[in-house]
Image (tube, rainbow, N blue to C red):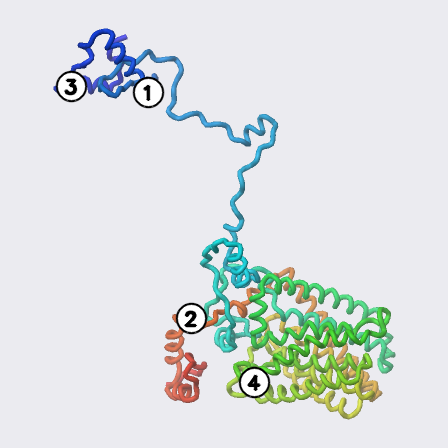
Amino acid sequence: MTKDEELPSLIKAISDHEVAGFDGVEDPHTSLSGTEAVEIEDVREMHSVSISMPPSPLEHKTKRVLFDDDSTNLAPPPAAPTTMFYSQPIPKASALHEAITNGKSAPLPPPPRVNKLRDKRYDSFKTWSGKLERQLTNLRGRPREREPHRVEMGSVPVDRYFDALEGPELDVLRPSEEILLPEDKLWPFLLRFPVSSFGICLGVSSQAIMWKTISSTESTRFLHISPHINQVFWFISIALMVAVAAIYALKLVFYWEAVRREYHHPIRVNFFFAPWIALLFLAMGVPPSINKTLPKPLWYVLMTPIFCLEVKIYGQWMSGGQRRLSKVANPCNHLSVVGNFVGALLGASMGIKEGPIFFFAIGLAHYTVLFVTLYQRLPTNETLPKELHPVFFLFVAAPSVASMAWAKMVGSFDFGSRIAYFIAMFLYLSLAIRVNFFRGIRFSLAWWAYTFPMTGAAIATIRYSSAVDNAVTKTFAVILCLVATLIVAALLVTTVVHAFILGDLFPNDMAIAISERRPKSSTTRRWYHRRAASSDAAVDQYLKFSDAKDVEVVETQPAGP
């Protein structure tokens, strides 16, 4: 084997260009004796370092070069073995591969933590994300991680709801406002489930009372209505009440902040009366085959939460603060009044004396004030959006139930009952003939406001036909009962279609996600936009009568040329 075959090309090139005093250094150990040379050679072998180099692209053989600590001479490489050496070791088989090969089970690597992948933008509305969670974390002595998506929640002033929202039931965000929750995705279902869903329970449970009245009243005996219809509607009402109450109870447990914001909402606060009124309806509509006499303590249990809510709401109406009646008055306030008359009707039916009179008096006083406030609509009140027009039928509910409650308390459908009944019929007729007033409205839960007042008017008409028994009153009672039943059936089918087929019954609830303060970036832009589209006289009028804390002006018509 020649020299050219033993050395790589790179080393050959270095050996051909030797530098004096550097490449040709004389080995000092050559002059030593034999014994000393052997000892030094042994030390050199102890400090030798072996480097395994990859195969040369030209020579498919592995070259080994030896270096020592005291010399730069290159030792002659030994004979190349037949086994090939690699710079990287062969990777070991994975645990899963060994388990499959050996037939044994091996633990798999742990998956990534789910908490790190969870969207934390909803934590501010959760029940356990507030002060209690921080206190428990501090007691455990664990440092709290910084969560950039968490926002400290506070009470939202009632002015913010009117400034930031518009549309049906104040649930549409204005274009210049920002929300605390993401707008680019669908929120969890509990956050999208509003308290106004209890309106469905009101409509269906009132139907159970109507069919019970038809089957048991002497003036409608000629219809030969079976009591089983009352049982069907009553059991459907029970199922709906349980389902809606269970879902909202979960929202109360997991998203307390969302429930609190609904309670502070100027319109939705009235729907907190709805579940208790629906329970009163279920008690009144219970089929005779199940129970004919209800225990009197049940009435006190159902009326206690209504009384507590009335103390809170009516006190705010009278206090003259941000939630005074002249500022927050809307047709949904009838829900906070009609519960008094429903409770008086049930109590009188159960034989209770003083309690029904007490609640009837409270309801009559506040209904009179509310009726006048809503009728005159002060200039400071905004016009209700078109989608909220169905709730105008709530005007009919209170006088209809009040006529029946008074008749049950005094024992006959006398002049007091007839006065309330005629008021209800006039309001019913004045709303029914205004077809264009309710045309082209987008479907929403507000449509269920049709059902409960129309059913109440039909039941009151049946009671009136018993006192004034003739063909006209009986025909009128049958017509109102048919209209109420058809509307409830149509709305029930439409609600099921939008909830389970179209999936648009519960959109993102913007009403609970508004910020506590108006965004600063939008103040100047909105003022300039409205100033440019307003006349000087309108701006002067606004500055003359507006509060110093107000930032934006009311919408005005563009100035003429």
Whole-number angstrom distance, CA of label 1 to CA of label 3: 25 Å
Q: Is residue 257 visible?
A: yes
Pointers 3 and 2 in contact (C-beta within 8 Å):
no
| Residue type for callout 1 | Ser
Whole-number angstrom distance, CA of label 4 to CA of label 3: 106 Å
The answer to whether 172 is drawn above or below residue 319 in the figure is above
Q: Which residue is mark 4?
A: 319
Instruction: Assess disc 4: are there few (<14), some (14-19) or many (≥20) residues with their C-alpha within 10 Å of its C-alpha.
Output: few
Whole-number angstrom distance, CA of label 1 to CA of label 4: 94 Å
User: Label 1's element?
Assistant: strand
The answer to whether 379 is drawn above or below residue 447 in the figure is below
* Residue at left offset 53%, top offset 63%: 130
Q: Which residue is mark 3?
A: 18
| Residue type for callout 3 | Glu
**Residue 50's mark?**
1
- Where residue 415 appears, as percent x and y from the top left, is 77, 93
Instruction: Assess disc 1: are there few (<14), some (14-19) or many (≥20) residues with their C-alpha within 10 Å of its C-alpha.
Output: few
Which quarter shows the C terminus? Answer: bottom left
Whole-number angstrom distance, CA of label 4 to CA of label 2: 29 Å
User: Label 2's element?
Assistant: loop
* Residue at left offset 41%, top offset 89%: 544
Whole-number angstrom distance, CA of label 1 to CA of label 2: 71 Å
Tell which residue pokes out farthest to the bottom in this image.
415
Q: Which residue is mark 2?
A: 519
User: Does label 1 or label 3 sit earlier along the sequence?
Assistant: 3
